[in-house]
Every structure is written in structure tokens, then in C-alpha cells.
Image (cartoon, grey):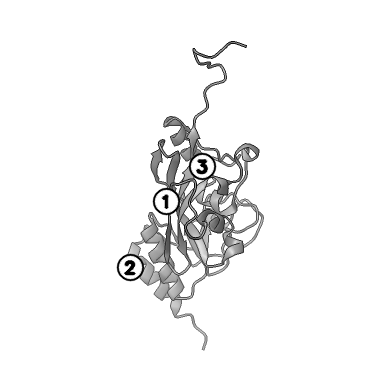
């Protein structure tokens, strides 16, 4: 007789650890079943919505212990179906990990959680007098974690490079729940593996590297308005 005894076990363990608010039934939110692509999927077993790296790590460890496939989701703006879950898989949505943890004008960095919308980070940097070079047409809905994972280019790619050129450090979580603390605020750092390159090419480097939970990204001094001229400048 065929049966799947692990299904209630996984859900029971997740709900016992995090509560019903962070663990939704797979059919509770139709928008988590698709992205901007036309790819078709299935109904996931559950939708997980962590708020921190610690919660994300624990959720992944539970799913891994029960052999459950996990599909990470960001802003759902992808066009290749990478965020579309298959039948019975577990969705991990980073939509609640939106904190902008720090803007340091001295080191020219902004540290944010992976689920922070790009536009929110841009606006926070602007208010602080800085410029975030990363910019996409989907800025209102795409998330920093997705920008990093896909090494997004965007509107300023010619001048500032792809996203990986702005990433200085990462905190990433493996599929088994292991946390990789690779945060860094230095432009030059030759110690160990280059975290930004590995995560930006995550799907090519390793299937076990699931998601970045936080990123430290370069921000620049905001450019002066075109009409502004220093009092000491020589007229041309």
C-alpha cells in the first residue's frame, strides 16, 4: 500500500516551530504559484515566509531532513520559470525579509535583507545622500536577493557593471540550512572564496547554494544636480 507519511510530519514540524502565520498551505496564495513567465507548475505542499536568516536556516534544515524539494521565491519577476513550484514542493518566499539594516556613507555600503524591493533600497540610499547603481525596470517588485542571484544588469550596466560588481559581501543559506557568513565591507578582499561571484553564479556553481539572506552592496555619493556648479569652478 502506497502512502506518504512524511507530508504531515513536515508540516507539523514546521508549524510547531514557526506557527501558522509563517507556514501557509500550498494553495493559500495563488500568486505564489507563478512568476512572469508562462511556465506551468503544480500546487506546493506549503509556502514558508521567514523573517530572518535564523528562521530561513531552520526551515531549510527541516525540509532537508525530510527530503523535500524547496523552491526559493523573490519578487516573482523572472521570465524563465525558476520560481515556479512543482507539485508537492515547498516554496520559500523571502517577501518578509525586507529590512534595510545599515547605510554606511563612510564605507559607501548598504546592507539589506534579500527580500528588500530594489526601489525601497534605492529610495533609502537617496534619502541618505547616496546612489545605488543597480536599477531595473522592475524596480518596484524585484528584490535584491534576486538581483544578486541572477547577476542582473539593468539600466546602468554600461557605467557601473552587473550586480556582482556592486556586491561586497553576502550571508547565504545552503539547502541543508547551513549559514555561510561571507559579509564584507571592503572593496579589496582576497581572503577565501569570492562570495559575490559564487552567489551571482549560484546555479552554475552549486545546486546546494539556495539563497542569499543578506547582502552588503556598494553605494556611491549621490551625483550633484546638472544645474549645480561649485562656487570655485571656472566658467567655461
Q: Nearer the viewer, residue 188 or 97?
A: 188
Label drawn at residue 16: 2
Alpha carbons under labels 1 and 2: distance apart: 21 Å
Q: Nearer the viewer, residue 37 or 221?
A: 221
Asked if residue 28 lies left or right of residue 135, the reply is left
Q: Earlier in the sequence, mark 1 or mark 2?
A: 2
Query: Of tags 1 and 2, which is closer to the observer?
Result: 1
Q: Does the image show residue 28?
A: no
Alpha carbons under labels 3 and 1: distance apart: 13 Å
Q: Secondary structure at mark 1?
A: loop
Label drawn at residue 32: none
Give the mark count. Answer: 3
Asked if residue 110 lies left or right of residue 166, the reply is left
Task: Give me the residue at 55% from left, 59% from top.
Answer: 198
Q: Secondary structure at mark 3?
A: helix
Q: Secondary structure at mark 2?
A: helix
Locate the C terminus by quadrant: top right
Query: Of tags 2 and 3, which is closer to the observer?
Result: 3
Residue farthest top in this picture: 235
Label drawn at residue 118: 3
Residue 215: percent from the left, percent from the top? Answer: 46, 50
Alpha carbons under labels 2 and 3: distance apart: 33 Å
Asked if residue 176 lies left or right of residue 161, the reply is left
Q: Nearer the viewer, residue 88 or 216?
A: 216
Task: Give me the residue at 60% from left, 46% from top.
Answer: 162
Residue behind mark 1: 97
Residue 163: percent from the left, percent from the top? Answer: 57, 46
Circles 1 and 2 in contact, beta carbons < 8 Å: no
Residue 67 against residue 224 in the figure, above or below: below
Circles 2 and 3 in contact, beta carbons < 8 Å: no
Amino acid at each position: 500500500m502506497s502512502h506518504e507519511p512524511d507530508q504531515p510530519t513536515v508540516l507539523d514540524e514546521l508549524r510547531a516551530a514557526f506557527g501558522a502565520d509563517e507556514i501557509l498551505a500550498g494553495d493559500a496564495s495563488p500568486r505564489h504559484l507563478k512568476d512572469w513567465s508562462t511556465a506551468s507548475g503544480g500546487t506546493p505542499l506549503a509556502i514558508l515566509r521567514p523573517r530572518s536568516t535564523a528562521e530561513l536556516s531552520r526551515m531549510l534544515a527541516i525540509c532537508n531532513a525530510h527530503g523535500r524539494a524547496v523552491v526559493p521565491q523573490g519578487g516573482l519577476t523572472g521570465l524563465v520559470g525558476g520560481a515556479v513550484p512543482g507539485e508537492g514542493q515547498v516554496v520559500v518566499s523571502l517577501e518578509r525579509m525586507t529590512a534595510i539594516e545599515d547605510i554606511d556613507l563612510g564605507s559607501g555600503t548598504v546592507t539589506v535583507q534579500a527580500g528588500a524591493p530594489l526601489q525601497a533600497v534605492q529610495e533609502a540610499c537617496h534619502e541618505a545622500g547616496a546612489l545605488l547603481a543597480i536599477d531595473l525596470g522592475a524596480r518596484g517588485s524585484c528584490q535584491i536577493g534576486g538581483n544578486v542571484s541572477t547577476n542582473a544588469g539593468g539600466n546602468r550596466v554600461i557605467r557601473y557593471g552587473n550586480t556582482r560588481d556592486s556586491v561586497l559581501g553576502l550571508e547565504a543559506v545552503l539547502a541543508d540550512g547551513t549559514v555561510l557568513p561571507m559579509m564584507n565591507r571592503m572593496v579589496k578582499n582576497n581572503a577565501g572564496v569570492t562570495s559575490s561571484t559564487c552567489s551571482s553564479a549560484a546555479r552554475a556553481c552549486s545546486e546546494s547554494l539556495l539563497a542569499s539572506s543578506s547582502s552588503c552592496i556598494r553605494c556611491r555619493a549621490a551625483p550633484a544636480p546638472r544645474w549645480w556648479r561649485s562656487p570655485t569652478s571656472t566658467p567655461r
